[in-house]
Image: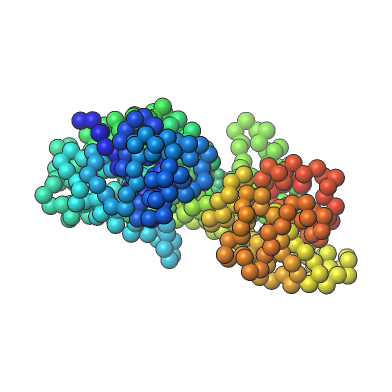
Amino acid sequence: MSFNIISVIGLGYIGLPTAAAFASRQKKVVGVDINQHAVDTINRGAIHIVEPDLDLLVRQAVDAGLLRAVTKPEPADAFLIAVPTPFKGDHLPDMKFVESAARSLAPVLKKGDLIILESTSPVGATEQMAVWLAEARPDLSFPQQAGEQSDINIAYCPERVLPGQVMVELIKNDRVIGGMTSVCSQRASDLYNIFLEGECVTTHSRTAEMCKLTENSFRDVNIAFANELSLICDAQGINVWELISLANRHPRVNILQPGPGVGGHCIAVDPWFIVAQNPALARIIRTAREVNDSKPHWVVDRVKAALADCLTTTGKRAADVKIACFGLAFKPNIDDLRESPAVEVTHLIADWHAGKTWAVEPNVHQLPASLADKVTLESLDRALAEADLLVMLVDHQPFKAIPGSQIRQSWIVDTKGVWR
Ligand SMILES: NC(=O)c1ccc[n+]([C@@H]2O[C@H](COP(=O)([O-])OP(=O)(O)OC[C@H]3O[C@@H](n4cnc5c(N)ncnc54)[C@H](O)[C@@H]3O)[C@@H](O)[C@H]2O)c1
Ligand SMILES: CC(=O)N[C@@H]1[C@@H](OP(=O)(O)OP(=O)(O)OC[C@H]2O[C@@H](n3ccc(=O)[nH]c3=O)[C@H](O)[C@@H]2O)O[C@H](CO)[C@@H](O)[C@@H]1O
């Protein structure tokens, strides 16, 4: 059975590129989002998020009549769900967006339809989603009861694209296809093969759910190792950047880079889903989260020590000292400030520092509300010319390009080894 209409539910950083990728292969796509602003923007052929090359694809798809956005699900042959899966108190996964998306599409389901959950989810979420759908549509059969011969096919297919390179990785990456049955996996593979150049690798939905969580936990644990090393090296008077580059000369060692902490809405969130389901077993994964989450506070302690030294040496009052924080984004060369450790560090500094706190962030034109009343957005040149203490938080390209001769400050806290 072919896919004449494909519906993508949730048109954010994952859903909109996916919808555009299907439309770029001449498929009719109906995008669904509860955010009226997102729907209106997309229907104008524009985008409400920042991702290279996405604007052009969306404009072409809308102009060609292949992509249309709506606020309520309509009948389709395949549905992909890409709604948020944040955590709530105690780091427990919050599946309310997936539940409401599943319940909202249930009334338009018909025999033969395929449903794919793409949202990063705890193990068992796909089976739970099938239960919600079966409750809403007792007239249809689902894989749990009907096995291979079910009316509706369901699969979990996680997304692993890197923000900033989504349009390339979406097409080129291999894809894990976790069907609830082998028929579900086959249908889901057929769907992705409409645009995929990478390979579809099939498994069960529970393994696919765990695979996504494992990938991001692996990265979190490895970054935590680098962050822990940076603390140890600081105590031992060793340059951690030199140490890592030396250790990485070993053919089987590949240490990641330390920084001010781990941000974004994936690596800092997803490992908690494993911890929540396996609290006694997931000891390294939990500790890695704790190490990475504690790093911003350690950075602020370094800034406090540098300020104390600056005051003693110069005889200035704290109120007269300007601290410039370089970078706010959660990683280099993007404008995304969500869950950013650089924002957290800047926030913590501004909260205790009696003098001025400046932020230099070439990728944004406005400070987030949490910083607006205590921090000023300053130009790179002014910060370099007038600040007393520099805090390097994000290794954006323009910061790496600053010649050493332009840095006259004696007090520098460099979390990225840019001005080492
Ligand atoms: N952004 C990434 O880099 C990335 C990568 C891999 C996986 N993921 C996962 O993909 C999922 C989506 O992430 P995102 O970054 O695209 O989120 P997002 O916040 O950018 O977009 C989600 C969209 O879903 C919409 N939405 C919420 N509830 C809805 C409902 N019931 N019906 C229709 N629309 C609804 C929201 O309005 C929003 O526009 C999450 O589980 C995330 O962990 C994200
Ligand atoms: C396994 C993996 O690769 N998953 C990717 C990840 O995308 P991401 O953009 O969130 O990932 P990163 O680039 O790793 O950044 C995260 C944070 O870690 C800091 N960092 C990084 C490297 C380092 O050496 N030292 C650091 O300190 C960095 O500054 C930032 O704060 O999750 C997406 C959603 O699930 C995936 O789709 C995507 O494949």
Q: Where is residue 360 in the image (x, y as percent from the top left)?
A: 69, 54
Name the residue rendered at 17%, 43% in the picture: 110
Q: Which of 310 and 216 is in front in this view?
A: 310
What is the x, y in percent for residue 114?
24, 40
Q: Which of 310 and 231 is in front in this view?
A: 310
Asked if residue 357 shows in the view, the reply is: yes
In which quadrant of the rendered view does residue 28 lie? top left
- Would you place residue 265 above or below residue 308 in this image? above
Report the label total: 0
Q: In the shown orientation, is residue 363 left or right of residue 156?
A: right
* Image quadrant where residue 291 sits: bottom right
**Residue placed most toward the observer, 396 or 209:** 396
Q: Give the left or right position of residue 46, taking residue 311 as reference.
A: left
Q: Quadrant of ligand 2?
A: top right
Residue 38's spot in the image, x, y percent? Answer: 41, 51
- Examine the rendered structure and indicate whether residue 312 appears above or below residue 263: below
Residue 223 visible here:
no
Percent x, y for residue 314? 88, 66
Q: Residue at x 29, y 39 (%)?
A: 6
